[in-house]
Image (spheres, rainbow, N blue to C red):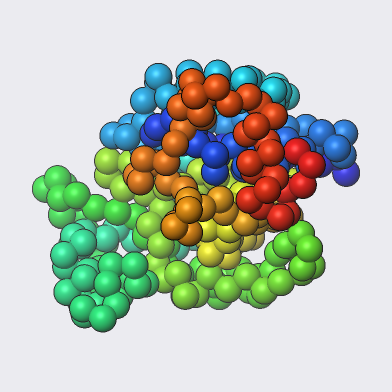
């Protein structure tokens, strides 16, 4: 089977070295195997994404010498497809509306846990009538996946991690994850798994920071009858202090580096030196 990889950035800022590492990794794997490399723009969050960043992403990738196959998939053009996937999950009895604020969740969890702990299930048994009333009143809400029921329906889950082989994929520790919000009609988890299936992605190459999300993706793939691709999570680029490069920390962008006189070869050499898994780019 021909390999298909993809690079799927969110246009919330300019690309930095960490993005370049992910883009180059997927491109290299596809091109060396004679496969296909796809570009997808994950712009479902209209509050943070900007068209000018999408334009900049395309320009930066071209400057790096990367090409892709077929048209660029823009997620915001496919909201009806994500809505249909949510409807299918709802028909399975797997979704429920959650009206909790972050403060309410944090208070329910207790100070030692913080907001990143699994959702404690406050709204899980609210009932359809009470939920419908609050939705009618215009209360903000999120749609959460009923994890316990979903796992029972899906059964034992596993995925193939390149370099490790078949490994268990247990989404239970993630709790009842959010799959949609009133202001963002579909979540990253839902959109990325849907699009990987639609686009025929066979190998997902991405940073190690997203490895923890893989079990929920495998769960959604099983529930929806979508193919489960192989995964390859590469090491992350860090700054001199050992912190992961991130937009919020104002990591130097490719545009900054280009303006300083760096070349494509310089960028690739930096990535090659910092990540042992990416060699001879």
Q: Is residue 268 left or right of residue 121?
A: right
Q: Residue 201's quadrant in the figure?
A: top right
Q: Position of residue 22 (x, y in %)?
A: 62, 43
* Residue displayed at 72% across by 48% down: 278
Q: Residue 231's quadrant in the figure?
A: bottom right
Q: Is residue 221 left or right of residue 227?
A: left
Instruction: Inspect this view and state whether residue 251 appears.
Output: yes
* Residue displayed at 58% across by 58% down: 208
* Residue displayed at 47% across by 75% down: 173
Q: Position of residue 7 (x, y in %)?
A: 62, 37
- In which quadrant will I find the N terminus? top right
- In which quadrant will I find the C terminus? top right
Q: Is residue 203 left or right of residue 261?
A: right
- When the figure is inspected, residue 129 is found, relative to residue 36, above or below; the finding is below
Instruction: Inspect this view and state whether residue 93 appears.
Output: no
- When the figure is inspected, residue 249 is found, relative to residue 260, above or below; the finding is below
Q: How many marks?
A: 0
Q: Position of residue 92 (x, y in %)?
A: 49, 60
Q: Position of residue 268 (x, y in %)?
A: 68, 36
Q: Is residue 135 left or right of residue 166?
A: left
Q: Nearer the viewer, residue 136 or 139?
A: 139
Q: Residue 170's quadrant in the figure?
A: bottom right
* Residue displayed at 40% across by 32% down: 13
Residue placed furthest toward the left? 137
């Amino acid at each position: 089977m021909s390999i298909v990889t993809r690079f799927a950035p969110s246009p919330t800022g300019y690309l930095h070295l960490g993005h370049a590492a992910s883009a180059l990794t997927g491109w290299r794997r596809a091109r060396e195997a004679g496969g296909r490399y796809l570009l997808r723009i994950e712009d479902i969050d209209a509050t943070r994404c900007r068209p000018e960043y999408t334009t900049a992403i395309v320009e930066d990738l071209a400057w790096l010498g990367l090409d892709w196959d077929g048209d660029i998939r823009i997620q915001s053009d496919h909201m009806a497809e994500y809505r249909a996937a949510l409807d299918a999950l709802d028909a399975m009895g797997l979704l429920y509306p959650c009206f909790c604020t972050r403060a309410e969740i944090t208070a329910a969890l207790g100070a030692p846990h913080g907001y990143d702990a699994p959702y404690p299930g406050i709204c899980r048994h609210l009932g359809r009538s009470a939920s419908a009333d609050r939705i009618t009143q215009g209360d903000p809400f999120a749609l959460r996946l009923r994890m316990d029921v979903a796992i029972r329906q899906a059964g034992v889950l596993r995925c193939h991690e390149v370099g490790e082989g078949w490994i268990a994929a247990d989404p239970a520790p993630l709790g009842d994850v959010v799959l949609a919000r009133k202001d963002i009609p579909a979540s990253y988890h839902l959109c990325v798994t849907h699009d990987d299936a639609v686009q025929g992605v066979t190998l997902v190459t991405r940073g190690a920071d997203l490895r923890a999300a893989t079990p929920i993706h495998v769960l959604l793939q099983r529930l929806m009858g979508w193919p489960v691709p192989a995964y390859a999570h590469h090491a992350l680029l860090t700054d001199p202090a050992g912190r992961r490069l991130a937009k919020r920390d104002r990591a130097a962008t490719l545009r900054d580096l280009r303006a300083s006189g760096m070349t494509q070869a310089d960028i690739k050499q930096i990535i090659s030196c910092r990540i042992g898994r990416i060699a001879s780019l």
